[in-house]
Image (tube, helix red, strand yellow):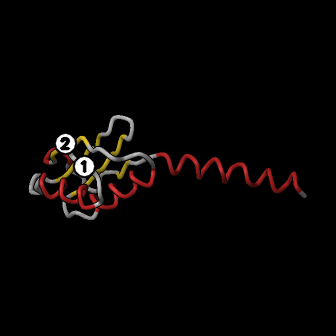
Amino acid sequence: MKKIFLWMLVPILAFSLTACTDAIIEPTVENTEELTTTELTVWGMTCNRCKNNIISAIVALEGVTMVYVDLKAEKVTVVHEPELDIDTIKRSITAEGYNIP
């Protein structure tokens, strides 16, 4: 019985580990030529929870099509429509408790 349980558990664990490591929200628009890419340095991000907080805050903004968070480099890259103000993106990050130098 234990052998069957472990055999079933391994694929589930492997999937859950790989599903949690990516911090990318894929583009939702077809024409990416008219989009703007903004890269911001963000201090205070230390873990996947921080990463998810930032992604959730930015994705909630209208006009955002992709978010990538790199914890090691302390960078957040946002692909968005040009109408979205960079200060709005910054405010959404600082509202979550993170610092932008």
* Image quadrant in which the C terminus is located: top left
Residue type pointed to by label 1: Asn
- Identified at 34% across, 45% down, the residue is 69
Vertical placement of residue 91 versus 15, above or below: below
Provide the residue designation for mark 2.
101
Q: Is residue 11 left or right of residue 65?
A: right
Q: Quadrant of residue 88?
A: bottom left
* Disc 1 secondary structure class: loop
Classed neighbour count for the residue bearing mark 2: other residues with Cα under 10 Å, few (<14), some (14–19), many (≥20): few
Classed neighbour count for the residue bearing mark 1: other residues with Cα under 10 Å, few (<14), some (14–19), many (≥20): some
Residue 23 in percent (x, y) is at 40, 48
Q: Quadrant of residue 5?
A: bottom right
Mark 1 touches mark 2? (CB < 8 Å):
yes
* Disc 2 secondary structure class: loop
Q: Is residue 60 left or right of residue 84?
A: right
Provide the residue designation for mark 1.
99
Q: Is residue 11 left or right of residue 57?
A: right
* Image quadrant in which the N terminus is located: bottom right
- Identified at 64% across, 47% down, the residue is 14
Q: Nearer the viewer, residue 95 or 60?
A: 95
Label ID, residue 68: none
Residue 42 in percent (x, y) is at 27, 44
